[in-house]
Amino acid sequence: MPSTSRRHLLLGFATLPLWPGMAQAAPSAASAAALLGCGRDAAGDAVFGLDAAGEILWRQALPGRGHGMAVAPDGSFALIAARRPGRWLLRIDLHQPQTPPQLWPCDDLAYGGHVVFLDQNRVALSASDAEGYGCVAVLDAASGGRIALWPTDGIDPHELLPMPGGILALANGGDAAEASCLVRLDATSGAILARIEAPPKLHRLSLRHMAALPDGSLAVAAQDRGGAEAGMPLLALWQPDERLHWIDLGQSQGDLRGYCGAIAAQDTRLCLTSPQGGVALLHPGSSRIEAADLCGVAPLGPGFMLSGGRGDLILPDGSRRHHAVAWDNHLKAV
């Protein structure tokens, strides 16, 4: 995602002090974190623990810009993935987040920015090998040791999503020469069970982010590599029968400016964000929220928490908090 507005913002943070007491957050406060968010403040790149009111509980430095996050099934620790094409993964104790984290570097793969838990003992990251082919790196959740490497039958894999029945869904972003595609893999063997591409007239779209819905379908958010054509659909439903059904968002579609930065689901409701458009859209319905460089979104309580690259946090009730943090693309509910 373009980072110009975020980096320009940080120039103004250089003289700001850190929040009092952040360096030694109490374990009891740390364990109450409701959300995780990566971002950059005056001290550099970090991941932050947030409470449900949008207050920062703790900060843990990162070796570079973070992107996707995953929380262990038992809630004891989290993993932070480097923004693509990064080569590290960080393991943080969520009960004592100020303790030194474990850094797991990688020298032969470029990670795609997202990580998920397959179970308590295994994690999966989107990645690309030295030739640029997409793969899923399966690691031991305790040591970071590699267990397996699965091809994704595409290039530039981005977000992954575990599904019921031992299935792993993945979005291959593609490029100008190779179409984007969605695949379902067996989460034990890595075998590809299904693959679907956008129709030829939509091949310029990059399918990148997904959210699971109660009926077993996946909502898929796209980015238009060809520009920001108002009529180009950016939301699709990948249905259990392997059909890809494109959703017309009406007049609001053009407000996304050809770019969905993130998507989240709360029961049957979806929230799509666009940093280019500075907007979050709720679907179904016509509700919208506006803020500059708005991208991060996570379900929280009855609604969604949102974050923007200029420091804004927007709570489900519509109230706002502001921190001297250039929030990155994603938020993660703990």
Image (cartoon, rainbow, N blue to C red):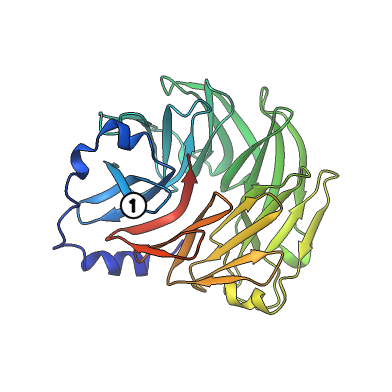
Q: Nearer the viewer, residue 40 or 267?
A: 267
- Mark yes or no: residue 283 visible: yes
Q: Name the residue rendered at 39%, 33% in the picture.
A: 107
Residue placed most toward the observer, 124 or 39: 39
Determine whether, in the image, residue 23 is placed left or right of residue 257: left
Residue at the (71%, 77%) spot, across then down? 231
Outermost residue on the right side: it is: 241
* Count of marks overlaid on the render: 1
Decide: few, some or many residues near mark 1? Use Cα within 10 Å; few <14, some 14-19, many ≥20.
Answer: some
Q: Position of residue 98 (x, y in %)?
A: 25, 33
Q: Is residue 227 visible?
A: no
Q: Name the one closer to the observer, 330 or 193.
A: 330
**Horizontal side, residue 106 vs residue 9: left or right:** right
- At horizontal 59% and vertical 76% (from top left) the residue drawn is 255
Residue at image point 43% right, 26% down: 76
Q: From the image, tell me which residue sits under label 1.
A: 55
